[in-house]
Amino acid sequence: MADLPPQGAPAIRVTTMPADANAYGDIFGGWLMSQMDMAAGLVAARYSKGRAVTVAMDGMQFHAPVSVGDEVSVYAELVKVGRTSMTIAVEAWHRHRHEEEQARVTEARFTFVAIDEERRPRVIGGLGS
């Protein structure tokens, strides 16, 4: 059975550009990590109904290279909720510009903490406020 992307729409979909790559046309890992962080942040902010910040990310391992012109789709799923924190599983997939076949590029888990106006952790859902 082929490896398939997660069900549902990606949190972010973007076409890679030359400014995102090294001299050989390979996309920077840091650029890809920032896309994943943004996707996780969208999920965290929506779930916590407010500001949330990244506090941790588990190690990333790259499974396939990404080139200039590839379409990158980033999927993010909430997998754990604590009192003030959320864990979000993120997968990045790519496909070459003129093809339909997709391949997983990398995956990681991001931990976010909901914060208030003073940048202090706040209880998710407003409990105890």
Image: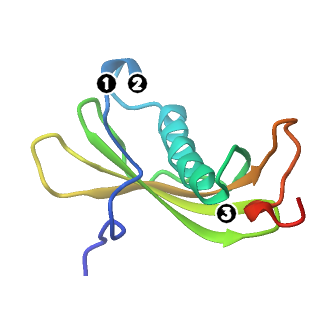
Placement of 9 over or under 118, stated as above or below: below
Give the percent coordinates (x, y) of residue 5.
Answer: 33, 65
Viewer-side label of 3, 2: 3
Q: Residue at x 62, y 54 (%)?
A: 44
**Which of the marked residues, 1 or 3, is nearer the chain's N terminus?**
1
Query: Outermost residue toward the bottom?
Result: 1
Which numbered marker is on residue 20?
2
Judge by depth and name the residue closer to the eye, 34 or 28.
34
For disc 1, the marked residue is 17
| Dots 1, 2 in contact, CB < 8 A | yes
Residue 119 located left or right of residue 24: right
Judge by depth and name the residue closer to the eye, 24 or 125.
125
Q: Residue at x 36, y 55 (%)?
A: 10
| Dots 1, 3 in contact, CB < 8 A | no
**Which of the marked residues, 3 or 2, is nearer the chain's N terminus?**
2
Residue 17 located left or right of residue 126: left
- Amino acid type at circle 2 is Asp
Give the percent coordinates (x, y) of residue 1.
Answer: 25, 82
- Amino acid type at circle 3 is Thr
Q: Residue at x 78, y 69 (%)?
A: 82
For disc 3, the marked residue is 87
